[in-house]
Image (tube, helix red, strand yellow):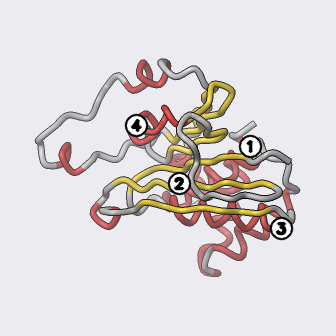
Amino acid sequence: MNTINFLLCGVGGQGVLLASTILAKAALRQGLDVKGGEVHGMAQRGGAVVSHMRIGEKVYSPLVPLGQCDFLLGFEPLEAVRNAHWVRPSGLLLYNTYRVNPSTVAAGLAEYPEDLEARMGEFPCRKLVVPASELARQAGDIRAANAVMAGALSRHLDFPLEAWETAVEESVPPKVLEINRTAFRLGREAGG
């Protein structure tokens, strides 16, 4: 198996790191090597969060080489556009439609770009819009959008459904497990 490169991005509080954990656990259940790293500097203040993950038979570095990302999960559309240059032309960019205003927009110092669809079109990779926040709300809690995104991704990897479901069970607190299971299933349906 060749190494598969993933980049997950969003803003603090969207569950980027939890989705990375679910992906890593599903891959480990397949006996694969997993390396990852994240940048979450100002995440507690709504800042950008980026998680690199590489999966394969043997992986030597946790960082995805620029332009070599196979799958980018954008939990927020502006963050997806900011990171789309990482995706290879044959890659897939899955992105949530829910907009989270950066602090500069919230403070009135900047405007949220209205041309994100056009900007997204500038990148040659395939794109899949995932209404993750809406689906998470249907599941019972908008915070489960990360499980929706993991579910959407699961349709594009050759891991058994059981591995994904077990990874979700091992990664979320018991009190929100049913919501996350439902969110994952909704995402899986939307990811195809």
Q: Amino acid at mark 4?
A: Arg
Can you identify the residue that label 1 sits on?
189
Distance Cα–Cα, label 3 vs label 4: 32 Å
Foreground label between 1 and 3: 3
Look at mark 4 in the image and give the residue it sits on.
Answer: 82
Between 181 and 155, the one nearer to me in the picture: 155
Task: Estimate the x, y position of residue 53 in percent, counting from the top left.
Answer: 62, 55
Which residue is rendered at x = 52% and y = 56% of the image? 51
Which residue: 64% across, 65% down? 180
> Type of residue at label 1?
Glu
Amino acid type, mark 2: Arg
Please state, as top left, top right, bottom left or bottom right, where the C terminus lies in the image: top right
Which residue is denoted by mark 2 in the rendering?
A: 137
Q: Amino acid at mark 3?
A: Arg
Instruction: Report whether 113 appears left or right of 80.
Output: left
Precedes in sequence: disc 4 or disc 2: 4
Count neighbours of disc 2 (C-alpha within 10 A) and say few if under 14, some if 14 to 19, many if 20 or more: some
Q: Please give left or right for residue 44 compared with residue 91 in the image.
A: left
Q: Is residue 182 above or below residue 132?
A: below
